């Protein structure tokens, strides 16, 4: 549940939305995409209403059950056909090292491998805004670093990125600005440098959340 939540994500930056389980992070992303409609308040996405700019927004959810029977190669070819100028599939396969996964059923991939495929699906349409919900959950250290590199490239290309994560090191490594929320409200925000001037990001997180999850 969201409770008077107010925040913004700047264009061309990486914004991390942090909070314990149940804080409202995934609910926030669902509101941004138009999957949920808040009872009150206003949401603007790329100067439009939620859901009105779907061709300019890439979404990487935590799980995609509808893809379970599909092979990643087939999935990426299908998604590429939905956009007028998709990212070449070979580029995404190389960047995320998806080659060995392309012909295996999605449901048989490990959690981290599924996340890599989910990220490719989110990026293939050349979005201006990318929403990443726990993008490296289940990934091994090498895959996580590879994913960080892809996210860095998005920022360098002027793409706006919003990510949620429980990995404080990941947030500190990637984010330009961090918003920490608890029980549906923002409790503290700032650049990583501002928030970590006197304490680690994890300490700041613990200080400003109720400790659930």
Image (cartoon, rainbow, N blue to C red):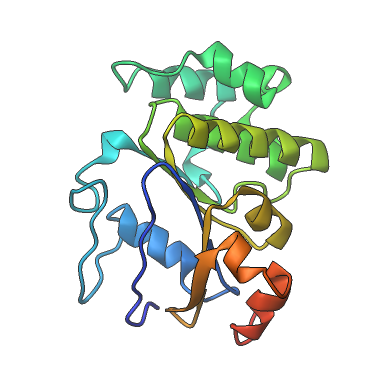
Whether residue 211 is visible: no
Residue 137 % position (x, y): 68, 51
Q: Is residue 159 above or below residue 75?
A: below
Q: Is residue 190 left or right of residue 105?
A: left
Residue 26 % position (x, y): 47, 63
Residue in the image at 35% along x and 76% along y = 5
Front-lying residue, 194 or 175: 194
Residue 198 % position (x, y): 71, 75
Q: Is residue 135 left or right of residue 132?
A: right
Identify the image quadrant of the N terminus: bottom left
How many labels sit on residues?
Answer: 0
Residue in the image at 37% along x and 77% along y = 2
Q: Quadrant of residue 29?
A: bottom left
Residue in the image at 63% along x and 28% along y = 105
Residue placed farthest to the bottom in the image? 210
Q: Is residue 52 left or right of residue 159?
A: left
Residue 165 % position (x, y): 61, 59
Whether residue 152 is visible: yes
Front-lying residue, 38 or 172: 172
Identify the image quadrant of the C terminus: bottom right
Q: Quadrant of residue 82?
A: top left
Q: Is residue 76 above or below residue 13?
A: above
């Amino acid at each position: 549940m969201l409770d008077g939540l107010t925040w913004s994500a700047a264009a061309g930056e990486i914004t991390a939305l942090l909070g314990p389980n149940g804080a409202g992070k995934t609910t926030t992303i669902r509101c941004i995409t138009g999957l949920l409609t808040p009872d009150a308040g206003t949401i603007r996405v790329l100067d439009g209403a939620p859901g009105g700019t779907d061709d300019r927004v890439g979404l990487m959810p935590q799980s995609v059950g509808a893809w379970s029977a599909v092979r990643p190669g087939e999935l990426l070819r299908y998604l590429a056909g939905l956009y007028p100028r998709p990212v070449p599939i070979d580029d995404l396969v190389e960047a995320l090292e998806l080659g060995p996964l392309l012909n295996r059923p999605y449901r048989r991939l490990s959690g981290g491998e599924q996340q890599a495929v989910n990220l490719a699906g989110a990026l293939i349409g050349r979005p201006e805004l990318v929403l990443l919900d726990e993008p490296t959950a289940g990934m091994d250290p090498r895959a996580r670093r590879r994913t960080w590199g892809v996210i860095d490239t998005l920022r360098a290309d002027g793409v706006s990125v919003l990510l949620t994560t429980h990995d404080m090191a990941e947030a500190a490594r990637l984010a330009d600005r961090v918003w920490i929320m608890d029980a549906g409200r923002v409790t503290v925000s700032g650049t990583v440098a501002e928030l970590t001037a006197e304490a680690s990001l994890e300490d700041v997180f613990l200080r400003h959340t109720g400790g659930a999850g």
